[in-house]
Image (tube, rainbow, N blue to C red):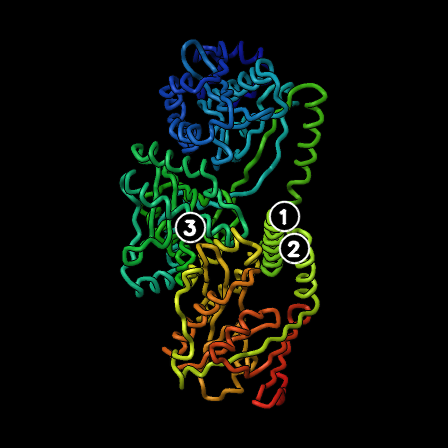
Amino acid sequence: MKYSVKTLDDIADLGMVCDDGPVERCQAAIERCEVVTDFPRLEQLWPQWERLWASDPRAEVFQTPEWTRAWWQAFGSNYSLCTIVVFAGDEVEGILPLVRGGNHLQFLGTPEADYADIICQEHRAAEVLTFALKTLLESVHGWDECSFQHLSRHARFVQHYGDLPRSLRANLRCVPNDRQQTIILRGQREAVFKSLLGKHHTKRLQNKLRKAGDLRFRYLESEQEAQRYLPDFFRHHIRRHAALGRQSSCASPEFCQFIQSLIYELTPTGRVRFGVLELDGKPLAWDLGFQVNGKFLLYQHTFDLDAWHYTPGEVLLWNELKYARDHVSREFDFGRGDELYKDRFANYSRETFSMFLVPPGVRGLWRGGIRTAQALIQPALGKVKEIVKRQRATLRAFRSLRMWMIGTMGSVRQARKNGALVECTFRVTKQLFRDSILSKRSTDVFALETTRTGVAGVSFHPDPDHDVSLSEAQLGDLVDLAWAHPDILSLKDLARCRRRMKNGDHVYIVREQSQIVMICWASSTGSDGEEPEAQGFDMVPNTPAVVIDESWSARTSDLAAAYRLLLFVVAREAARRNADLLVHCGPEQGVLRKELERQGFRRKFQTTRYKIFSRFRRHWVSRYPENGLHSSRLV
């Protein structure tokens, strides 16, 4: 029998409802609520908390005492405790875990928790929730709003919202949020996983990695072993999100401390799963998940960007699903996030909600009006988002715009820090016009015929006054560079960098006393994968060449030592390949031009590249003979 609570008097008179009989007092009536503001006092209630949590067969790991302790250790210094505990005699009947930050109240453990809820037994949920919210409104003062976020449609907060007294519902606003993708098994585990694990594309990627070496996926057994892998997990998580133009949660020291504490707390309980995918003993991908009550939740995962050609993220997911096939009985939850890959595997989309409690009075009416408007607008925004996700071209355009905005704002912040804001504004405006409407760039191409001279034509002697070093960068290094120095490399250019690396191009970074002073690309095919004749290769028939075709250098007049080292290393590589060395030099690169002439390079060609609306391209190539410029052609 279902009973809807209408008033507080009904609760006091009836106590509870039995599942198989008429209304009667089956348990002690709720007598009081305590507002816990001291964490040691909350820890005294752990046994009662654990008892209530264990009574729910669908309980999430995010409401466990271990999660609460780990979260408080990492983030508690920014909040004060304000948790409502509901008692019936000496027994705890419910806990509404809350913290206070300024004038705002929220669930303890959020926003890091994927799901949140009140902690109580199902048959007393409406009663406990009513007393807890009434206590919050009457006994806790000085707050503007209390947000109950990350509520699934199965949360007791949502299920019993309609059972609350009308006076309480008048102060609550329910706002729909995103949908979370999940795999519901429903007694068809074998059929579901057979379909998921049999996907041809994923199996092909798995076989590709196996051919590359000894492939192994495992969940780490001990807390000590997991802690050793965490620094790499954090670093690559930051890189992976930066490549998408997002701030990683692992960029926060508090979050990293939280994950470390969480593994320490949950490892003895067997509820945490920290997995690693290794190739010949080297980690390629990591995942952090939780397994409770027949459910596996994928909380955080990432992979090494430098191994992107293996697509380790999908191979990691394949191994996670293989593990779930043998160890999970109810559900595989992908957690929060709108990544496109989830749509390919999920068979169910779960709604999530936020509820906002506002205090009585004018202040509460104002905030309640805002949340009511949000509740009306949010579904429409969700539909627009789903439409955009289905339109891949539109989605790529939005992502490109976001990356451009992030990179531009980063350049502006860096320029303001360096006192060059006006110059940066002018440069960004000029670049926007050039990239979107018309672009023209002319460069001279200098040649060193290493096939005949070897590397003897380029000399390099360490300069005691200039401590310069050179290293070849991987994709992860470029992501770090774009995130930390958007004035050097924009995030929007990372996709192009990846394409160039896929084509076999190399990027070199020159540092002086650990400071980046130069970046350049070297290829044998030309910039952006263009045809060789666009670079002037047709002028040197039947001769392979290594081309330095794109570079950035710091605005300093003393770059000769950096250029000297760069030319020496690339010329040596060209000689190893039995190829000539071609260097593009723009009119603004006076130091490079002088160094090329000093090292015996000869000016061979001039290339002029036109780009209209970022699409229409033309290249004008001219040849420099000994007696002047002639022999021009359009390619």
Residue visible at 62% across and 87% down in the picture: 629
Q: Taking 45 as reference, is 634 left or right? A: right
Secondary structure beneath dot 1 equals helix
User: Relative to 23, does residue 583 appear above or below in the rendering?
Assistant: below
Which circle's residue, 2 or 1, is located before the other in the chain? 1
- Of the residues shown, which amino acid type is indicated by label 3? His
Q: Nearer the viewer, mark 1 or mark 3?
A: 1
Can residue 23 be seen in this snapshot? Answer: no
Percent across and percent down for residue 223 are 29, 38
Badges 1 and 3: C-beta atoms under 8 Å apart?
no
Percent across and percent down for residue 577 are 38, 79
- Of the residues shown, which amino acid type is indicated by label 2? Cys
Report, in whole angstroms, how far the alpha carbon at label 2 lies from the one at label 1.
Answer: 9 Å
User: Relative to 264, does residue 449 appear above or below in the rendering?
Assistant: below
Q: Label 1: which residue?
A: 416
**How many badges with numbers are in the image?**
3
User: Relative to 518, does residue 272 appear above or below in the rendering?
Assistant: above
Few, some or many C-alpha atoms within 10 Å of disc 3 (few <14, some 14-19, many ≥20)?
A: many
Residue visible at 58% across and 55% down in the picture: 487
Which circle's residue, 1 or 3, is located before the other in the chain? 3
Few, some or many C-alpha atoms within 10 Å of disc 2 (few <14, some 14-19, many ≥20)?
A: some
Q: Taking 420 as reference, is 215 left or right? A: left
Quarter the C terminus occupies = bottom right
Q: Which mark is residue 236?
A: 3
**Closest to the observer: 347 or 507?**
507
Q: Which mark is residue 424?
A: 2
Q: Nearer the viewer, mark 3 or mark 2?
A: 2
Percent across and percent down for residue 3 are 53, 21
**Closest to the observer: 224 or 119?**
224
Can residue 633 be seen in this snapshot? Answer: yes
Which circle's residue, 3 or 2, is located before the other in the chain? 3
Badges 2 and 1: C-beta atoms under 8 Å apart?
yes
